[in-house]
Image (cartoon, helix red, strand yellow):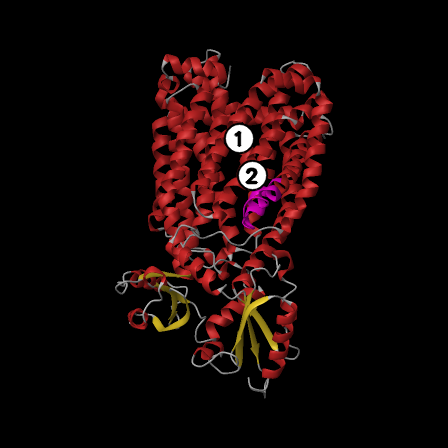
Amino acid sequence: MNRWATTVVTRRWWVLGLAILIVAVAGAWGTGVFGNLSSAGFYDPNSESYRVAEIVEENFGPQTADIVAMYTAPEGRTVADIEADVTAVLDRFAAEVPTHAINTYWSTAPPANQLLLSKDGRSVAASITLSPDSGVSVGTFDSLLPKLEVPGIESQFAGNSVVAVAFTSTLEHDLLRAEAIAIPITLVLLVIIFGGLTAAAVPVFVGVLAVLSALATLRLLTMVTDVSSFALNVTSLIGLGLAIDYGLFIVSRFREELESGADTATATRRTVLTAGRTVMFSGLLLICAFAGMLVFPQAVLRSLGLGAIAAVLSAALLALTAIPALLAILGPRINSLTWNKTAAHRGEARARRFWGSVVVAVMRRPALVAVAIVAGLLVLAFPVLRASFGEVEYTALPENAPARVATQTLLDDFPSTGNGATLVVRGPDGAPPSTAAVGEVSRAAARVDGIAQALTVASNEDVTVVQALYAQGVDGTVRAGEIVHELRAVDAPAGTELLVGGGRAMVDDGNAAISRWLPAMLAIMVVSTLVLLFLAFGSVVLPLKAVAMAALSLAATFGVLTWVFQLGHGAELLGVTASPLEPSFVVLILAVVFGLSTDYEVFLMSRMVEARAAGATTEEAVKFGTERTGRVVTAAALLLIVVTGAFTISGLSIMRFLGVGMILALIIDATVVRMLLVPSLVKLMGDANWWAPAWMKRVHEKVGIGH
């Protein structure tokens, strides 16, 4: 770090110029990511249901409809009257767009064609499956739907791909709107916090660079793996928020060094060696937290993890390059463009007096404060015992979204969505299964409560596919999952192999994989955090306390989220439909909150460790650290609330879940836990806080904060 600090000071124009040039070019290239994102990746590729999907597609091609077009006959006309018009449009569509299959009410043999006729007999549905090599992407999909509209006939479009593209389009729109709102508000808050425009502009400037860098990284990732459309918003806004937070921390330390009488070069070097080293540890902690997401088999979780890691890395690198170089150029001018030359100094003095009085009051009755806060957080955490996993459904879209309206119409007006369990019967040694064996499986499936009928839909070589269709009202309910378990309990006929898949099975298998791998993720996060925090603090006790505090913050956050989003208390106020928690976003929030919790711990404890290393007592170190970082930590949390809180204005309920979760976690952790609970516990533990074996101390002296 010493060598880098010197380089930043002596080569400041080169460092800043290269950083801006590289990020600008990369960001311009990265804007191409919008058309390359995936809506898939939520399923476990190692599961039985995924194997069923692969077998069916290998033998019979894609079976899941991309588009379900619904056509309603005008008043005074019947579905027979609109057959010619609809068929002509569908034939023209098939001639223009490579399709695997188009099944309509008129082309499908009875009794299966009844599934494509509405219950009132006024509407028909056409199931359209695109060819795997159709060349249609997320960016070009919307152009297909106008081709399916029939003049004079009401046309609606549902289907898996229609809903998925609606999600992606909403996310892209939400990202632009969120950044347009968050960046100006953040700048205003920074002006108030810093007491000047120049100091406020530095973190925002670097935040914009971080967003451009995040776009470039995501596009790079799309070249080697599927990247979820959700990763776009998560990566961009986390990168923006962290870059601003790091900028706030570094600029605050630089101004503090200038106030102490240091010249620009010395202040910059000290800032890099102190705040810069803290940012480095903070970035490593967050990277380790997100690295835990890479253990899951689902591509969506890995892409979210990789995107978040890229955001953290971008923010940290820019904080250690562009910000110090810019500070070395500005020097005392960092305090320019202010309404009052003493505004910044007076603001900092007020903050130190406030947090100093708070921490003194906490340390007078540390046991009472600690017990009260822990008890309160445990009460908030209680609903988490009732949490359960669900999936991202069409109801996460805005209520007036055409894809959501059409999907609801399909569920309400048609006798069945055509969904159900898919059973694959395989014969012995490459031979086809016997008719008797297939019949036995079909009869067993039809006897399961909630199955309307079981149909043999395809046969090829040693594979026969039986579709067990759900009865009306079963699809999307808990009963659908129970049916999958009951079907998997059916004994395969002698000499055959029976596999059960389908949409519900893939969701349940994916959730089971998350539950199975969650302990491994937690182990990676906890172990890496303990190691890094020891290297940072040179203590055995402080890292253990930090992990315990992070766990308490997480429990309280998920307790409130469960109470609102799953149990439905206040869900209508947020405009969301109460439903089980989507596990991918549970994992994401867990990683983000754990990382930020230990992140703020580093900000706070680094100053306590510095004071302790300078000879302060435990009480003096606690007071010094809280006074110097109270304003920074709470301001950083406020700024991150503004940035990530932009998720709450999203049209997608799942993004509101993420936004509310982040706001709750930041409020709980940055104020109640960091500023009240941590000082009380450090006071109670006394000198034990700083204990470590001699050999560990020697390691810390070489790399730790404060040395």
Which residue, given by chain and number where applicable, does mark 1 sit on?
Answer: 283
- Compare residues 471 and 325 and report the one nearer the observer: 471
Which residue, given by chain and number where applicable, does mark 2 sit on?
Answer: 640
Q: Secondary structure at mark 2?
A: helix
- Compare residues 310 and 434 and report the one nearer the observer: 434
Horizontal and vertical percent for residue 298?
A: 45, 48
Q: Amino acid under label 2? A: Leu
Boundaries of the magenta span: 217-237
Horizontal and vertical percent for residue 358?
A: 47, 27
At a point 53% along the width and 30% down the height, the residue shown is 283
Horizontal and vertical percent for residue 465?
A: 39, 67
Mark 1 crowd level (few <14, some 14–19, many ≥20, 10 Å Cα): many
At a point 65% along the width and 49% down the height, the residue shown is 176
Q: Amino acid under label 1? A: Gly
Q: How many marks?
A: 2
- Compare residues 619 and 578 and report the one nearer the observer: 578
Residue 258 visible at all: no
